[in-house]
Image (cartoon, rainbow, N blue to C red):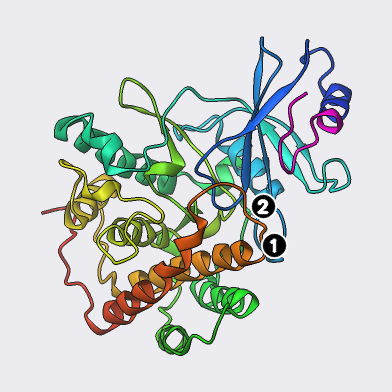
Amino acid sequence: MSETPGLDLAAFRAWYDARRPGEIAGDLHGRVIAGGRSNLTYAVTDESSSWIVRRPPLGHVQATAHDMGREYTVMTALAPTDVPVPATYALCPDPDVIGAPFYVMEPIDGTAYRSSEQLAALGPARTAAIATEMVDVLATLHDVDPAAVGLAEFGRPAGFLERQVRRWGKQLEGSKTTERPDAEELHRRLTARVPDDDPTWVGIVHGDYRLDNLLTGADDHIKAVVDWEMATLGDVRTDLALLLVYDTLATLPAAGLVSDVSTAPGYPTADEHLRRYAERRGRDLGDMGWHLGLAYFKLAVILEGIHFRFLQGATVGEGFDQIGAGFDPLITRGLEALDQPRPDRSRGDD
């Protein structure tokens, strides 16, 4: 058996054999799948069959983050819908088996596009088609009735936006690597301007939706949405805003720290994303300025948490030494989003 940091293959096999006897036929081998900067994802195989195993990161873990049961529950519930998700096999909530809770799902033959270079090789037309389908899949997810798939109790939509602001403020306090006065100012202003609840926008929120959290097949169609650790019920515009913020990150001094796909030829603009989403959902998005401010704050806090773990020596993989550089540019853009609300340019009935 090969060594995999954070996954004892012998312990995993004993546990999995007890729950799905006979599936594993030979010696297990595993590897960490490159690109994960939050939960750890492993490809495990016995040379005739394969599995994907997900567990929380090593070291410092926020109390409300990296919930394996949450990921497993939402993917299992979405299996019969038009939202593409991997099949789920087993969940282990017991941290004593491998040192943390984990779950097992099917491997998907697809590519997680993380760089403009990957997309550039496809050409502008294919890139545009993939990115457009990314928005279509997001709209499909947001159209799912949570109660119809058994997720009525998956979250608390009332007060969702206020809790988001409060939660990410606490996350920052729990993983700050230095004093962050501008971030505290952004958090204060977000708190002062939390929009009222709007039940018409309540749905299943992925929480970290972007192109490299999708697996795209060789036919350029999306085969699976993955990385559901932040999923909940709430205002689904938070997903759309975060997608736009991820795209903006490629143009900031911290370019490429998460993904620079938005710089690829043919990749749609933010306005095109907004129009496509509004058309698919058949409604006016209104002013997205506050939602963008929250999304910039959230992403900055996520990067700070990863940077915190890097400084502790608790990250696995490459590229973590520069992750902290993304914080300040994101906070600046968040403040600008609140100062310059976007005009209404996203009507679906134009």
**Left or right side of 132 for 147:** right
Compared with 324, 11 (above or below) is: above
Indicate the quadrant containing the C terminus: top left, top right, bottom left or bottom right: bottom left
Residue underneath mark 2 = 57
Compared with 284, 40 (above or below) is: above
Please identify the quarter of the rendering in which residue 127 is found: top left
The spot of residue 94 in percent (x, y) is: 85, 46
Residue underneath mark 1 = 61
Compared with 188, 250 (above or below) is: above
Q: Which mark is residue 71?
A: none
* Numbered label tally: 2
Near mark 2 (Cα within 10 A), the count class, few <14, some 14-19 or many ≥20, is: many
Q: Which residues are magenta?
A: 1-12
Q: Nearer the viewer, residue 10 or 247?
A: 10
Compared with 97, 223 (above or below) is: above
Q: Residue at x 49, y 65 (%)?
A: 303
